[in-house]
Amino acid sequence: MKLLPIILAVLLPLVVALRAQAQETSDAFCDRCLAGMGKSWSPKDFAAFLPSPNEPVKPMCDEISKYMGPLKKVERKQKLKETDSITLTGLMHTCSYVADLDCAKGKATAKIAMAMHDGRWIVTFIDVDSPLMHPPEVMAVENSAKQYVKSILPSLLEWRSERLIELSTENLRKDISPGMITTNAMMFSFKQTLGKPKTYEDAHIVGQGFHGKDHVMDVEIPVVFANGPANVELELVGSTNGWQINEFHINKRF
């Protein structure tokens, strides 16, 4: 135990020094990342900054490129959060930023998160958004998904396996069926834990993209149940047959 103060006295200044060094590096990396990705917003531009060049970023890249055009300059950049911790493998350091971008076709906002991995920074999350990326045709698809959720939510939250299956894609139906004990147990657990829904908020679109020709929409609906609030999370797939549920999750809020 006498060694502990000595170890801490040696280790903590090292952590502080590493953190200061990482802080400078994170700023430089963020600048380099935005400049590199913004050249043409192509998957090739993204590959140098992601943990794997095979990340499925093409739909996002195509959307940013289509509506925003190449990055002209970063007008403002602000660090949102920075954390570090000592683990068995060393110092784990993460940072996140928000930046205002001036692109060829207009203004956008970028949110980017990064982590130190094997001695170098990698991007763990990036989102670029702008009013220009929500033209009437895109808003029409989003509104269609929201209306679908509004129409099916009351019956879905009756917690009947049969109803979930009626609304599901073929992919989800492979994992669930009315006769499956796990499916029935899941719906029964939701019913016992949450009870009946009391109020719904409007659905929020939290992500979207494409799977082949089908539109994929991630939707979150805050609901107040008899036993407390929870978020209903759906992945919807839209095709010529309309919208269907491809994933279904409930996250209880405490």
Image: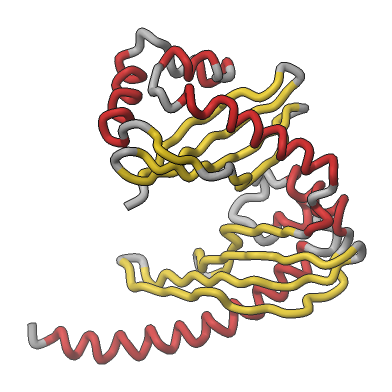
Q: Is residue 154 above or below residue 90?
A: above
Residue at the spot 61% in from the left edge and 72% down from the top edge: 97
Q: Position of residue 152 (x, y in %)?
A: 55, 25
Quadrant in the rendering for residue 157: top left
Residue at the extreme left: 1
Residue at the spot 44% in from the left edge and 35% down from the top edge: 249
Residue at the extreme right: 104
Residue 213 or residue 14, whichever sits in front = 213
Split into 4 quadrants, where in the image is the N terminus? bottom left
Q: Position of residue 229 (x, y in %)?
A: 37, 46
Residue 120 or residue 92, whichever sits in front = 92
Residue at the extreme front: 198
Residue at the spot 88% in from the left edge and 63% down from the top edge: 70
* Relative to 7, 155 lies left or right: right
Q: Position of residue 228 (x, y in %)?
A: 32, 45
Residue 214 or residue 118, whichever sits in front = 214
* Relative to 220, 147 lies left or right: right
Q: Position of residue 54 (x, y in %)?
A: 66, 44
Residue at the spot 71% in from the left edge and 33% down from the top edge: 144
Q: Is residue 146 above or below residue 241?
A: below
Quadrant in the rendering for residue 29: bottom right
